[in-house]
Each structure stands twice: as structure tokens, then as C-alpha cells.
Amino acid sequence: AQKVTQAQTEISVVEKEDVTLDCVYETRDTTYYLFWYKQPPSGELVFLIRRNSFDEQNEISGRYSWNFQKSTSSFNFTITASQVVDSAVYFCALSEAVHNTDKLIFGTGTRLQVFP
Amino acid sequence: NAGVTQTPKFRVLKTGQSMTLLCAQDMNHEYMYWYRQDPGMGLRLIHYSVGEGTTAKGEVPDGYNVSRLKKQNFLLGLESAAPSQTSVYFCASAPGQGAYQTQYFGPGTRLLVL
């Protein structure tokens, strides 16, 4: 069955530390897409990245990077030199091309607190 | 562009009361979704719509009804509110069909049922 697991409920770091948020997924499909969303204290959900199952290249965007490994069914998110503005809840989500197409399956989220 | 907007932002209801949450998008998206967010449970899909005049059930549809009379609007109704429906409700929209489509979310509606 399809599932997204974010085992880290809450992480606290001090500014400038690097932090990795874990995401493990389960799917029957060979074609699927993985997403990360950010939910800052203001409450809205902000799209960060989408990755398809055929592209295992790591992606970097400024201080953000994502590591996709099909062998371990993981799509981890790293923030380098964290800042207070990175404090938020981060959600990983899965979309399947066949069995649950057009629907997003969310993990339970990881709350990141960055202290000055 | 406003993107996805939700009305109201916050509402308090008494058990048994009814209300309608409005979602509007100005991106000409075909697909629209209603989710609820509860502590420790992530976002769960309530209902969704693949186009004007069509709706379908999601993971947790009981106690809710929806309508999509216009492409840009997706309404979520609670006919008889229960305390278990206390939650934050998010609307989202996506351009069209396909697992690769990115969903864009509204700011959320916080609902408290007493």
C-alpha cells in the first residue's frame, strides 16, 4: 500500500547547523512523484520541490538540497547553514501514476525549530 | 494573481450547526481538493473534483459534502457540525490530470466546533 513516513516528529537545531529531514515512502507503482512542502508558522503550505521516480539526481537550490534514493525508498531533505526563517513544519508527499493518480499522500510532517 | 483563497479564515460553530467553506482559484486549474489537517496526522483528503460539475470522495469524506458549480470555486459543506470536525481545512488546486501535477494550497480555514 502507499505510505509516506516521516519518523522525525520534531527537530531542534541552532542557527548555522545543517539539518536533514527524513522521508521514506512505500508504493506499488514504478512511476511516481515525490514532493516537499513547507508550512511556516503563518500556516500556509508552500511547494518546495517535485521529483519523479526516474530521476535520481540530487537537487540543490541555494541552502536546500534533496537526496532521492530508490534503493532505500527515501527522499531526504537537507538544509545547510540553517536560519531562524527555516523554522516550519515540513511535509513529504507521494503521488502515484497508476494506483492513486491525482492524489497526494502526505507524511505526518516534521517540525523544525531553528534557534538563534 | 491571488492564487488559491479560502473564506473564512476562522470560524467557531456549535455542535449541530451548518456552514460552508469557500475555496476560489484564479489559475484556471481543473482539479481542486479539500484536505483537513489534524495534529500528528498530516493532511488527509476529504473530497476532490476533477472538473466543473464533478466531485469524488477522498480518504475521510463522512460528514462533508462538496459542490463545484463553477470551475474556479469549490465549496465544502458541513451539514451538522461535530466536535470531531474541529480542524484546519486546506483547499488546493492543480492544473490537470496526472501524478506529476503540483498542488497549490490556500491559506487554510481554522474551524472550532464546540
Image (cartoon, coloured by chain):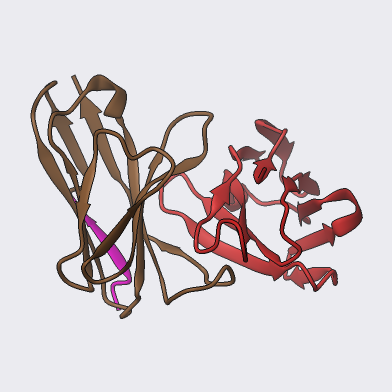
Q: Where does residue B27 sit, x and y in percent of width and height? A: 33, 79
The magenta-colored residue range is B1-7
The C terminus of chain A: image quadrant? top right
Residue A88, quarter of the rendered image? top right
Q: Where does residue B55 sit, x and y in percent of width and height? A: 29, 59
Q: Where does residue A54 sit, x and y in percent of width and height? A: 80, 72
Q: Which chain is red?
A: A
Q: Nearer the viewer, residue A66 or B43?
A: B43
Residue A109, quarter of the rendered image? top right
Exactly how many numbered labels are in the figure?
A: 0
Asked if residue B5 lies in the magenta stretch, the reply is yes
Position of residue A93 relative to residue A10, above or below, is: below
Q: Residue at x 33, y 55 (%)?
A: B56
Q: Nearer the viewer, residue B103 or A38?
A: B103
Position of residue A23 relative to residue B33, above or below, is: above
Position of residue A48 relative to residue B113, above or below, is: below
The N terminus of chain A: image quadrant? top right
Residue A108, quarter of the rendered image? top right
Q: Residue at x 33, y 40 (%)?
A: B61
Task: Give chain B's shade.
Answer: brown
Asked if residue A96 lies in the magenta stretch, the reply is no
